Image (cartoon, grey):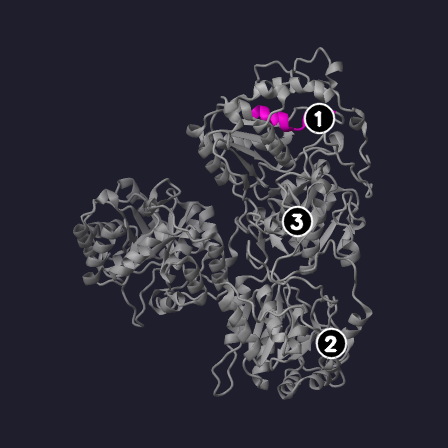
Amino acid sequence: MYASAVRRSATFTLANGAQIPKLGFGTWKMSKEEAAPAVAHALKAGFRHLDCAWAYRNEDAVAHGIKQAGIKRDQLWITSKLWNSFHDPEHVEKALDDTLKDLGTDYLDLYLMHWPVAFMNANGAMVRSIRSTGGHPVEDTELSRDFMATYRVMEEMVKKGKVRNIGVSNFNIRRISEATESAEIKPVVNQVEVNLGVHNDELRNYAHAHGVTLQAYSPFGSNQNAAKYLEDPVVIDVAQRNNITPAQVLLAWTLGRDIIPITKSVTPSRIEENLRVLDIQLPEEDIKHLTDEALSRPIERTVDPTEGWAVQDEIFEDGIDQTREMELKGGAYVPPPAHESPIEHRLEPRNDPETPSRQFHTSAHPMAASSSSSSSSRRPTAIQARLSPRSGSSSGSSFFRSFASSSRSAAVAEVQPPTASEAPVVSTSPLLRTTTDSAIATPGLRFTDRESNIERETKKMNMYTVRTFSTSAASRASVSASPSASSSAAAPAPTSSSSSRTFPDKKAFLYEKYLRLLRDSPMVLVLQHNNLSVADFSKLRADLAAIKLPEGEAARASLTVVRAGLIKAVTRELSADNPAMAQLQPALSGPIALLTCPHLTPAYLSALFNVVDRALGHAPPRAPAAGQSFPAVAVANPRLVPLAAVLEGNRLLPVPQTRDVGRIGSLDQLRAQIVGLLSAPGQQLAGVLSQASGSQLALTLEGRKRDLEAKQHIDLHRQQTTLLAVRSAIRDAQAHVLAADPTACVFGEDVAFGGVFRSTMGLAEEFGRDRVFNTPLTEQGIVGFGIGMADMGHTAIAEVQFGDYIFPAFDQIVNEAAKYNYRSGGQFSAGKLTIRAPCQGVGHGALYHSQSVEQFFMPVPGLKVVIPRSPIQAKGLLLSSIRDENPVVFLEPKMLYRSSVEQVPVDDFTIPLSEAEVVQPGEDLTLISWGAPLYACIEALDVLRNPPAAIAKHFPQAVRSASVEVIDLRTILPWDRETITRSVAKTGRCVIVHEAPVTAGAGAEIAAHVQQNCFLNLEAPVARVGGWDTPFPHVGELFYKPEAIRIADALVKSLTY
């Protein structure tokens, strides 16, 4: 976990190329007596970044500290800030000169506008503010709103050489957007509060997308919150696991989000402790864990002078600003600048404009050498020529095997798998993971509770292989049975007890917390939350906190987001002595939250349920007129669904187990059922239902179907895997989404029949033909329909039967889906649209069923393109694609549908997009590919190490032991530039393999990027191996696609260059 000590001098690169030290030393709230020795010690310890401000009134003491430390000016980064009293353009330079004088320097490395607020100061007096009779500063509202008038003078200071970089401070998305659009010299820094109480995640995403680096003041929460954040159980847990201090956790978390923390201390030991964070690299999962924790909390600012200064416009605009990620929703792709170099290395003679054009045809295949046209000037490589006799001895009958169906609408068509002579050996490839342990260890694999590469605690039903039972009549009858009957029934025996289980430190404190909630709370309401935003949770928690407490009580209701795996383990421990907990377990799947109530008094419960009703989307109903009854149907909000309630820790209030909104005859009937089930507190609850005029009716009328069939006997201490092919894994992923997301739909040509490759088999029968349905044979209509569904909030999974026929929908994908969010200024989005399409060659599909189409989408911003290579990748990447907030084109290699088989976790998990996988590390050459050609690459490495005797002379001994790094790109757009650049810079050689034609293929963009960024590291030209510039042939398919010998030939050429 510790990096090299060289990290101490590490810097961030600002948008203008300036190098800024990644850790700052702040001087806010330091007296002059404290500032000088603190700054001196910080500089001697190793700090080189000082954060100052005119308003701190200690800049002369900072200068004294610099002098004491004896550090040269050119080794320091000094930041100061323009105070609100000097926003008048006539006063900006005067304020800057005063700061330069106090700091004893003739320039600043960075000058920030302290606040987007201007105070009246007609004469430019060097005062903090001119106060009104009410004690507030007098605001210059016009200048506050026209802050660019002040900023333009700051730009002039750069031109004069008094300032080298300029930026802003305490700007929200709206203001930073105005500044970046209007400025001649764009701001490179925005300094804002960032800590566990103010995550500023939306601002971070927006700022980074527009070339603005965030600096974080108060990373510990300042004086009023520092103790709380440093003693937070999550922070302490991360600190203990990484053997660092809580303060270092918070600083490393901030650095891990590419934000510069500004630390502040006058204690020498703490100054040194803070500085040591430069030697710490917090694991990615811990950064994500802390970020999620911060996102789950309401915003709690330590500094917000909006009211104290009585300004006209709210400074931070919390609750509104979080919705302003216009161009960046979900991390939308930002295209890089165009490659500017006019030089192109011609890797193939056919790509050289000076070379006469030649005709390439399938007769050039080595297997047809005896009958090849003599007019063809294209010669095979030396290695291919040596292999031609061997290839010619193979039976040619397989080359004339017809495609299973030439009709696109033939749902039952299956492609006959290619023979060994036509395709790489997939089934025995080392790329596949054949054991449970290796499957769980897949790089990047994340289960939905955000845990990776650990022993799992729970197993969900494998939605592809487990189809031996359906909802029984008894189970259906239990839904309508009275609660009293269900409560008296014997509880099902738990499959395993977790009472003796020892949990990792990472989860132990959460386990104890959940245990206390279920055991000690008088009432627990179990809720399923779907796609609720941080703002939604914050508002719900604020509404709960605002409920008036009963007299003499101090505890309030709380809403806790829980991990499904842990909460299930807790209920298993409690179920031995508590039948209600055993009955509760089927409801604990997916995203779960617990609403705990410490009081069962009628007034408090009534107010609590009113809050829940509003969160569910219900307006509190008025009392019905005389002679009328309450509505029998409640309006469901799928974003928040009540599942069950536990009273007194041992009584379960079941939610009607219906797929749609439940129905009930009358409120009296409901109250009778509750009274029959519950104890005295339950009777109070029943009384509250009447007193609240039926507003709580939704608690028992809403719910989603829960599987109550008999549980399988499973090993609860390990994650379960099952053997799946790619098509089964794709089917499994879609089943997970359909089960967890009531808005999800799958549609396309013949999907209700199982699909041409059986990747939707049985989904229509399981989830209904209103959610899995066929469409006409119109690709443009399919995608257009999906865009509309996604914009209306549905999770739309569209299948285009073959990637070759995606072109009629090109306008819908490129000009509508990808640009919809941008065109509407963030008001609309097709981000919930995923387009599945089979691609690449298989079984002689010829020119209409074999093409690779990923290269056509390379220049499309706002779109993502993904190609998996194996069942684990197919399931994890598809789930990530469906849940990504950008439209995704998910291309599935047809050859791998049945031939690629491995152990796949049965749980719901994701693999991150835009992160390439280093399949095999190496030092001498980087080999990049994706999809089916990866298997040919692995075979090529075997050929390189152990060439056949007939061609061994073409493989020098020196190259046979070459260490080749193999990278699976996985996401083609936006692709992982960092991993590729880092690898090629290390190896100095690069070979790119894909099935699409080499000309203008995706490999061309990668090669251009490598050439531009690794030019000085390259030992050989970047080589590309791909399809020829011809239509995909029906017979010579092996010759057209990159196969092991062609790839090995390219490896030898590169290694011997």
Q: Are marks 3 and 2 in contact (CB under 8 Å)?
A: no
In the rendering, at what x and y percent does residue 737 appear?
67, 56
Q: Amino acid at mark 3?
A: Gln
Looking at the image, tell me whether mark 2 or mark 1 is earlier in sequence order: 2
**Looking at the image, is mark 3 or mark 1 nearer the viewer?**
3
Q: Is residue 10 above or below residue 623?
A: above
Marks 3/2: CA–CA distance: 50 Å
Q: Is residue 83 visible?
A: no
Mark 1 neighbour density, 10 Å: few (under 14) some (14–19) many (20 or more): some
Q: How many marks?
A: 3
How many residues crowd around disc 3 within 10 Å: few (fewer than 14), some, or many (20 or more)? many
Q: Position of residue 77 (x, y in %)?
A: 28, 47
Looking at the rendered structure, which numbered label has been put on residue 631? Answer: 2
| Residue designated by label 1 | 1031
Q: Which residues are magenta?
A: 1036-1050
Residue 930 in view (yes/no): yes
Q: Secondary structure at mark 3?
A: strand
Q: Residue furthest front?
A: 949
- Callouts 3 and 1 close, C-beta under 8 Å: no
Q: Which mark is residue 661?
A: none
